[in-house]
Image: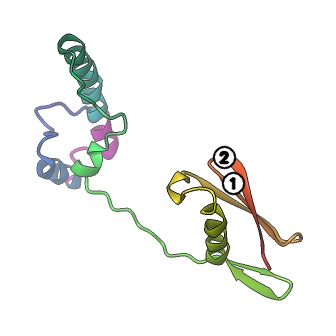
């Protein structure tokens, strides 16, 4: 279905939520409509900025559909335990050791991506931060 301004009100989320719940349109339909709106809005804002020497911003990562269509994210609580040679260590314990070492030189808010590689035989956890190898933590 193609959503146009008459059938979907981007400024009235309650109407859009009701229509979505009644299967009048899908999330993909709504995303397509929002994408069309943004495609029209960005050149408009660019022209205004150029002509008036203003600095109006339109963020690339606008998440309008989260406001319009109720979506709920579900977080499943988890614990990871590493067992080796009759011993057990929690992922949280390793991460806390990593954070302690990291904070000796850097700030935690500098971490955008963290990957942990475990080598059970060597009893080591290798922490890769933002795509670059950074710290090795011993299990023991």
Residue sticking out furthest to the bottom: 86
Q: Residue at x 21, y 34 (%)?
A: 3
In this view, the residue in front, 89 or 34, is 89
Q: Is residue 40 left or right of residue 79?
A: left
Residue 103 higher or lower than 22, as above or below: below
Assign the N terminus to one quadrant of the image.
top left
What are the residue bounds of the magenta stretch?
22-32
Label drawn at residue 131: 2
When asked about the image quadrant of residue 61, the answer is top left
Q: Name the one closer to the observer, 8 or 35.
A: 35
Q: Is residue 53 above or below residue 32?
A: above
* Residue assigned mark 1: 128
**Residue for point 22% across, 55% down:** 21
Residue 34 at what x, y percent from top left? 27, 35
Check whether the beta carbons of the residues at disc 1 and disc 2 lie within 8 A of each other.
yes
Relative image position of residue 107 (x, y in whole percent): 54, 57
Q: Quadrant of the C terminus?
A: bottom right
Give the distance between the C-alpha atoms of the residues marked 1 and 2, in whole angstroms. 6 Å
Of helix, strand and loop, which one carries label 1? strand
Farthest residue in the right direction?
Answer: 121
Does the image show residue 116?
yes
Image coloring type: rainbow
Whether residue 24 is in magenta: the answer is: yes
Q: Residue at x 15, y 53 (%)?
A: 18
Label 2: state its secondary structure.
loop
Residue 120 painted magenta: no
Answer above or below: position of 45 versus 27.
above
Q: Which residue is depicted at the point 65% across and 77% down? A: 93
């Amino acid at each position: 279905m193609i959503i146009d301004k008459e059938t979907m009100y981007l400024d009235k989320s309650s109407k859009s939520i009701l229509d979505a719940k009644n299967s009048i349109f899908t999330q993909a339909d709504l995303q397509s409509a929002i994408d069309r709106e943004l495609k029209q809005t960005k050149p408009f804002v660019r022209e205004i900025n150029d002509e008036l020497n203003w600095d109006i911003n339109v963020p690339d990562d606008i998440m309008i559909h989260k406001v319009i269509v109720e979506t709920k994210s579900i977080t499943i609580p988890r614990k990871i335990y590493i067992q080796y040679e009759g011993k057990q260590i929690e992922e949280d314990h390793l991460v806390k050791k990593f954070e302690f070492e990291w904070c000796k030189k850097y700030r935690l808010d500098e971490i955008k991506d963290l990957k942990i590689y475990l080598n059970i035989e060597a009893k080591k956890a290798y922490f890769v931060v933002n795509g670059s190898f950074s710290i090795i933590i011993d299990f023991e």
